[in-house]
Amino acid sequence: MLSELDFMKALSAASPFIKALVIVVAGYYLNKWILKLLARSFEKAGHMDASLSKFLLKAANIVIYAIILLSALNALGISTTGLLAALSAAAVGIALALKDSLSNIASGILLLIAPKFSTGDFVEVNGECGNVLQVDLMHTTIKTPDNRHIVVPNGSIMGSEIINYSKEDERRVDLVFSISYEDDAELAKQVIAETANAHPLVLDKPDKPFVRVSEYASSSVNITLRVWCKAADYWTVHFDLTEQVRVSFDKNGISIPYDQLDVHIKEK
């Protein structure tokens, strides 16, 4: 039969394992509570980018689990000093072997902390256009208008030109219409202006529609139209005006010329 002394010795021997188990279990539930609290705080912040909040939650999760692991090892009487030194040496070797990947990670952190764009923005990167789906540590995923997913390394993004079409609420639509030299340019300008002003998505601010002759080309007189609209309505306005101005030209007898070459033959 187990004596009280033997029981105390067994309990004393098992005590570090019990402490480590309590730390792991309590740490698990504490981690879940902290992450939920952080997630709610990020939601209340409102303006925080979705990719940034995901990154911060992942980082917090890793840090908390690292603290739990070190605390459990200390409870077991295992010195973490040597372990940390070994991990530091291993980290240096891994960093040298994965310097390109680490460059992408560093760029990803910069993109999240000091963003050049936000999740959902319509951007152009390396000649590709699309909406930003997610910014991860190593890659940024962009969804193109034709439903392609493009995964771009963050290091490449940081070193390239980025055009963000969603940064401002309004965008300007620039269109050029060509008419024949035989047509009335003033009438054409009037027709274009009336068509633009009649469109419900065209804005009067920051400027009203601008219509002026911009070029006397070899086969045509070119008239430039500039109108402002909401960024989300850009392509609707672009295609609507392109079609509607042509219809208005036809109604008013204004022709759209094609390239032509006049040849004059001189007889000797």
Image (cartoon, rainbow, N blue to C red):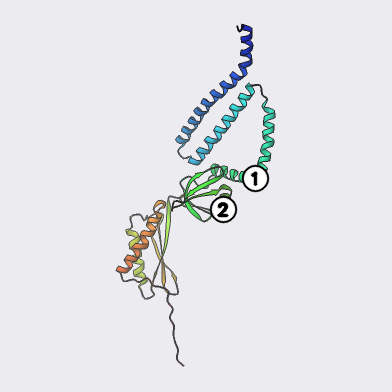
What kind of element bears circle 2?
Answer: loop
The quadrant where residue 26 appears: top right
Residue 56's place in the image compared with 140, above or below, is: above
Residue beneath the point at 63% across and 47% down? 100
Taking 259 as reference, is 250 left or right?
left
* Residue 237 placement (x, y as % from top left): 37, 57
Residue sticking out furthest to the bottom: 268
Residue beneath the point at 51% across and 25% down? 29
Residue sticking out furthest to the left: 251
Which amino acid type is shown beneath numbered disc 2?
Ser
Q: Which disc number belongs to residue 99?
A: 1
Residue beneath the point at 57% across and 22% down? 23
* Residue 149 placement (x, y as % from top left): 48, 49
The label nearer to you, 1 versus 2, is 1
Taking 211 as reference, is 14 left or right?
right
* Residue 109 placement (x, y as % from top left): 57, 42
Q: Residues within 10 Å of mark 1 (few under 14, many from 20)?
A: few
